[in-house]
Amino acid sequence: MQSAKSIISKIFNMLEIRKTSTGLLLLGVVFIGSLVPAAAQDNSPYSRYGIGTLSPSTNILNRGMGSLSAAYRDPLTINFNNPASYSSFISYAEQKAKKSFQSRVVLDAGLNFGSRTLRESNNPEKFSSSDGYFSYIQVGIPLKHNWGMSFGIRPVSRIYYKMSRREYLNGIDSAFTEFNGDGGAFLPTIGTGFAIKNFSVGANIGYMFGRKDFSTKRTLFNDTVSYKSANYETKASFGGLFYSAGIQYKANLTKAVSLTLGVYGNMEQKINASQDIIRETFTHDATTGNRTLDSVDYEKNLKGKIIYPSQVGTGFVVEKLPSTKEAGWLLGVDFIQTKWTKYRFYNATDAVKNNWEVRIGGQFRPAAKRNYFSNVSYRVGVFTGPDYIYVDSKELKQTGFTFGLGLPLANYNRQAAGQATIINLALEYIKRGNNSNYVKENLFRVSVGLNLSDIWFQKRKYVD
């Protein structure tokens, strides 16, 4: 197995905002932009199937709690899994006479750094790869009290594998085969959520796009006969509208403890695709690389559809907020189901199956004191369930353990006293497969999130 570089860069143009907020948000954009072009050296053979290896679907705060998200809501965090949570963004009292208001705008961005280890069953040898890649960037804006919106982009899946096999063939001598895959899917979205009393509802609309590039290169070796190398390659690009929605209901169990119920999901989506099928012979030169000799078959721009399956997630969160005298805590459970047997690529099925996942997570916040660590949030979680990949009728079990921290940073800017900055860290250890599968994967991932917020639309008074 080998590795290759993959560069992903996205540029967001933002409306003109007040000066102090601009500096804060641009700091976050520069932080993400400087690290996004990290070398993606991940290598997973299972990314060959379906839409690829699924990227984390939640923000980094939630990942520290086992990716708990169905019923989670926080005014300083963007839970893009359930858009009903957008209604929790903070909007301060409106000044009706002047028809203006103040709001706390949130910028949430994240990066992942992972190390993956592959092992064959009953084989002590292993292969390790590492990577660093963009996780998401989201902006949350309160529109009015109990009404907010969010927009941003995140990866949905990643495809990268590079493997080779050497074998001996009767009458030919030997053959060398190289299997390569590259691509993935991304989802920019914009959504809104509003609340009426304790009930919240929201929806996202986005455009899922991406590509899949699979190739198999085969070279035959013989002492007396010269064979041409062959390349069997399929390239596909796709893009289409994507919709999702969610609801949440919050009730107070006591004066200090609340219960929130949540449901989110998406219907089955049909996405337009274009495909090129290439069958060719080539020669390889160490200086110039591969050179095509003859295109045996080349079908270009074949139109088709990709069917992305429906998904539903449901869960609850019980929470007690911290005070100056008592600590706060949060405990929640999610259950997610996805109908992957409905997945189609140009009407063809794949080695995928319906799957489910249980996520359990919690958070502890000490009583608010003046020392730093009393203001840190401590998180832990676990998730388990079968992966959606189902190769040779063998279930691919997946279990993960997570730990997270919310680290607030002090604000020394007297001209922007409303600014708040939190660094969220998540550590994840994920086991994929066991001895009944051909390949077992162990993934250790460190995720870093930069959460920035500031008060916008605040009118200042100048005194002579």
Image: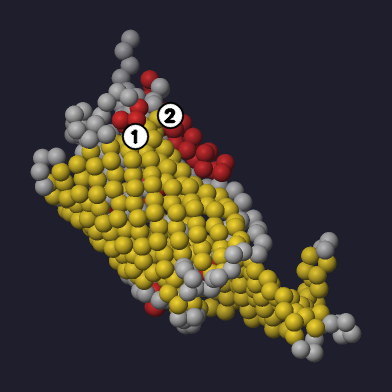
**From the viewer's perspective, is residue 146 above or below residue 419?**
below
Task: State left or right for residue 149 relative to residue 234.
Answer: left
Q: Secondary structure at mark 2?
A: helix
CA–CA distance in space, label 2 to label 1:
29 Å
Percent across and percent down for residue 294 are: 78, 80
Task: State left or right for residue 260 relative to residue 134.
Answer: left
Percent across and percent down for residue 343 are: 42, 76
| Any part of residue 355 in sight | yes
Q: Residue furthest top?
A: 464
Q: Which residue is mark 2?
A: 19
Percent across and percent down for residue 275 are: 58, 75
Disc 2 marks a residue whose amino acid type is: Lys
Q: Which of the image's four quarters has the N terminus?
A: bottom right
Q: Secondary structure at mark 1?
A: loop
Q: Image quadrant of residue 5?
A: bottom right
**Marked residue nearer the N-terminal end (2 or 1):** 2
Residue drawn where x is 45% and y is 81% of the image: 393
Q: Which residue is mark 1?
A: 376
Q: Image quadrant of residue 405?
A: top left
Which class describes the residues within 10 Å of circle 1: few (<14), some (14-19), or many (20+)?
Answer: some
| Any part of residue 81 in sight | no
Residue drawn where x is 52% and y is 52% of the image: 114
Q: Which residue is more in the foreground, 181 or 15? A: 181
Q: Nearer the viewer, mark 2 or mark 1?
A: 1
Q: Which residue is more in the foreground, 460 or 324? A: 324
Q: Pointers 2 and 1 in contact (CB under 8 A)?
A: no
Q: Residue furthest bottom?
A: 171
Residue drawn where x is 52% and y is 39% of the image: 31
